[in-house]
Image (tube, helix red, strand yellow):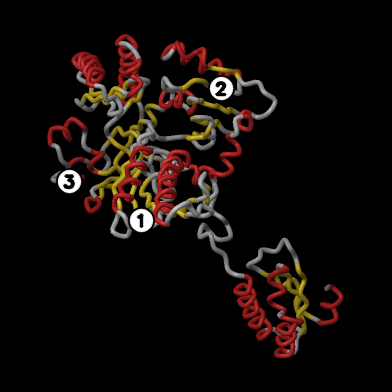
Amino acid sequence: MGKKLIINCDSREFRVGVLEDEALREIYIQRPLSERLVGNVYKGRVSNVLPGMQAAFIDIGLEKNAFLYVSDAIVANHLEEQGTTDDVQINQILKQGQEVVVQVVKEPFGTKGARVSVNINIPGRYIVLMPLSKHIGISRKIEDEQDRSRLKEIAQSLFEKDQLGMILRTVANTVDRRQIEMDYKLLLGIWENIQRTVKIQKTPSLVHRDLEIVPRVIRDVLTEDVEEIVIDTHDEYRAISKILENIAPHLISSVTHYKGDAPIFDHYGIEDSLSKVVKSKVWMKNGGYLIIDHTEALTVIDVNTGKFVGQRNLEDTVVSTNVEAAKEVAAQLRLRNISGIIIVDFIDMHVEENQQKVLQVMEEELQKDSNKTHLLGITRLGLVEITRKKIRKSLHDVLLDTCPTCHGSGKVLSDIAIANRIDREIRHYLRHTKDEAIIVEMHPRIAADFKGANNENQQFIEQQFGKRIFIREKEFVDIEHFNIIYSGDEKEAAALY
């Protein structure tokens, strides 16, 4: 079985699922009210230069200023000539109030604004145009020297016309010179339009918007091994067919308009897979499992044998589990779009040869990821370090909100801890009131701990202060809080209770 693109479009969000051998491997989600910024080009103004951080804040017209590192502030042509940024100071390049054209390379996240670069990249179907660079590159995934030589010659001939750098993408190896040249002309037109717009637009402003999700996925994800593209709306079916007419006419026959009764993501099992993606535990086929824990600084993945007990000795069981885990970790990084620093805590292996075997499997599986991923090796504590380039939000951030109760910690106070705190607060209140009785609302679980066995704790407090406590147990009350809804005469309290 090959690769399929399953596209679900409605008014609330667009979703594209990438299936490989009928298993969900990647998911792209875009909502109309949460605009994607990566790839957009802005005319901005330097709002603040920070020499101590070798960076600057750029006002590009968004809620938060964008962040520009010194390495991203040097035009590629100059960087290629100098070879290093070690001796370059940010305040030598940028001044407060200076206008600058930048492209978003990383989405805003949390309290951080977007990360930007002065080096504009314009991706096409076969080429990534780098107009401020003189570099010519060929995708590393094209290994055949004859193919690389052919593409290098095409790229060189295009470069000689306009002196614009470029990288030929993997899919360029599947088409002839004419199609690559057409893609180049399209990208050149976009670059010329950006230059014209910069001259007439005010500052700050958007001067170029990257493609919306469906055409963008077609541009970036569609490869020759895609056997089928299935869309659930007629308008998008027609739009994609039209796109393919221009960039890959031989693939038009693979486009299908889904008309089934069940929602398209249900039909292909994607909805069920998505429900599992938000969970921290991932079961493996052999009975082992992963625990994926997200923090602000990094993602930690713990490997466990679980139900798998093996057939031979402990080392064989551990290695078998770790090999399976290496495959699953790589798959989960793609599927959940986990990026940044990733630490994998494999089960301890005592034979170095086995460690290298697991690392080799991991390296091979990571090669399937189109995102830039680096396997850095294993630490003295046996932890495997991985970095993955962050471009868009992870599924964890797209699909989940911070819990309003635990505020993202994943922990809440125990019932007895809450009951003890409420006990202290009620005692404090009774100590300072002249009223004879109070009526208190609290959650039934907390009420049970507050009262104590046979109401002994409640009775002790009443005797201590000579006042009555009437407790109303309410399921809807926040478990960590209580409400004193009446304070006054005992008879009236009894009547209201």
The one nearer the camera, 35 or 485, is: 35
Residue at the extreme top: 178
Relative placement, left or right, of 468 versus 302 is: right
The alpha-carbon separation of the residues under discs 2 and 1 comes to: 44 Å
- Label number found at residue 349: 1
Q: Which circle's residue, 1 or 3, is located before the other in the chain?
A: 3
- Label number found at residue 89: 3
The alpha-carbon separation of the residues under discs 3 and 2 comes to: 51 Å
Residue placed at 57% from the left, 33% from the top?
A: 13
Q: Are marks 2 and 1 in contact (CB under 8 Å)?
A: no
Q: Secondary structure at mark 3?
A: loop
Residue assigned mark 2? 230
Q: Is residue 101 above or below residue 454?
A: above
Relative placement, left or right, of 168 versus 392 is: left
Q: Is residue 406 above or below residue 415?
A: above
Q: Give, as a three-letter code, the residue at label 2.
A: Val
**Quadrant in the rendering for residue 350:** bottom left
Measured from the top left, where is residue 55 in percent x and y?
26, 46
Residue 231 appears in the figure = yes
The one nearer the camera, 85 or 288, is: 288
**Quadrant in the rendering for residue 187:** top left
Q: Secondary structure at mark 2?
A: strand
Measured from the top left, where is residue 473 in percent x and y?
76, 69
Query: Which of labels 1 and 3 is toward the front?
Result: 1
Residue placed at 57% from the left, 57% from the top?
A: 404
